[in-house]
Amino acid sequence: MRIIGGAFRGRRLSPVARGVRPTTDRLRESLFNILGAQVEGSCWVDAFAGSGAIGMEALSRGAKFVLFNDRSRKALGTVEANLGKCRIDSGFQIHQADVFLLFRRLAGRRIDFVFLDPPYRFALHEKLLKAVAAALAQQSPQHLVLLEVHKKVGNDVAGTHYQVRRRIPAGDSHILMLEGEN
């Protein structure tokens, strides 16, 4: 696993120990090629951070701020180690919280991109997307949610709060680019 582009291109990242499915290099590359210049100066939430690869890719490509969150202390230790490997010392915060609590705490903050990569067996997508929409409605009405799901998950996972703008496939995973229902 490595940073694909930007200032930290080519830096190798450590994966989280067993049980965590990282976003593949190929899928990250596709995502960031699509987002292009939108990343510059943006604010991100990497809500199920794992190794932190998505957030570090965003910082590498000019994002202003990334909030890394995971409820696993082990995963956050990997995020810290990977930030050190990339010599990233500013433009981020690290939180250890349940994802629903995280979004209650984020209400009123400006966020441009929310990256959600819950475990494949996660059964609360609609509840989570409702929490994201509620937290970001006032301050960040134009945010995009980037939801990584198994390729067999349909677009209906977006529920009533978001609509699928684009589906980015790679292997067994897809990223759904979701925008709010205004």
Image (tube, helix red, strand yellow):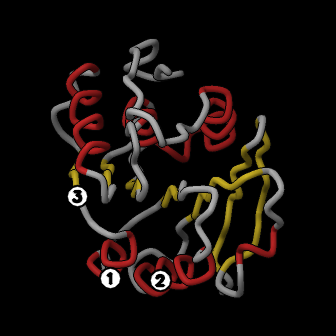
Quadrant for the C terminus in the image: bottom right
If you read the primary sequence from the N terminus, does the residue marked by circle 2 or circle 3 appear first?
Answer: 3
Q: Badge 2 is on which residue?
A: 131
If you read the primary sequence from the N terminus, does the residue marked by circle 3 or circle 1 appear first?
Answer: 3
Q: Residue at x 39, y 58 (%)?
A: 45
- The image shows residue 27, relative to residue 148, as above or below, that is above
Q: Residue 20: image x %, image y %?
A: 48, 42
Distance in Å between CA atoms under marks 2 and 1: 7 Å
The answer to whether residue 159 is left or right of residue 118 is right
Distance in Å between CA atoms under marks 3 and 1: 13 Å
Q: As shown in the figure, which amino acid type bears the numbered disc 2? A: Ala
Distance in Å between CA atoms under marks 2 and 3: 17 Å
Label 3: element kind: strand
Mark 2 touches mark 3? (CB < 8 Å)? no
Label 2: element kind: helix
Most distant residue in the front direction: 18
Label 1: element kind: helix
Q: As shown in the figure, which amino acid type bears the numbered disc 3? A: His
Q: Quadrant of residue 147?
A: bottom right
Q: Badge 1 is on which residue?
A: 104
Q: Residue 111: image x %, image y %?
A: 40, 65
Q: Badge 3 is on which residue?
A: 95
Q: Residue 13: image x %, image y %?
A: 39, 22
Q: Residue at x 79, y 62 (%)?
A: 153
Q: Residue at x 79, y 53 (%)?
A: 167
Q: Quadrant of residue 26?
A: top right
> For mark 2, does the 10 Å Cα neighbourhood hold few (<14), some (14 to 19), or many (20 or more) residues?
some
Label ID, residue 171: none
Mark 2 touches mark 1? (CB < 8 Å)? yes
> For mark 1, does the 10 Å Cα neighbourhood hold few (<14), some (14 to 19), or many (20 or more) residues?
some
Q: Residue 73: image x %, image y %?
A: 23, 49
- The image shows residue 72, relative to residue 169, as above or below, that is below
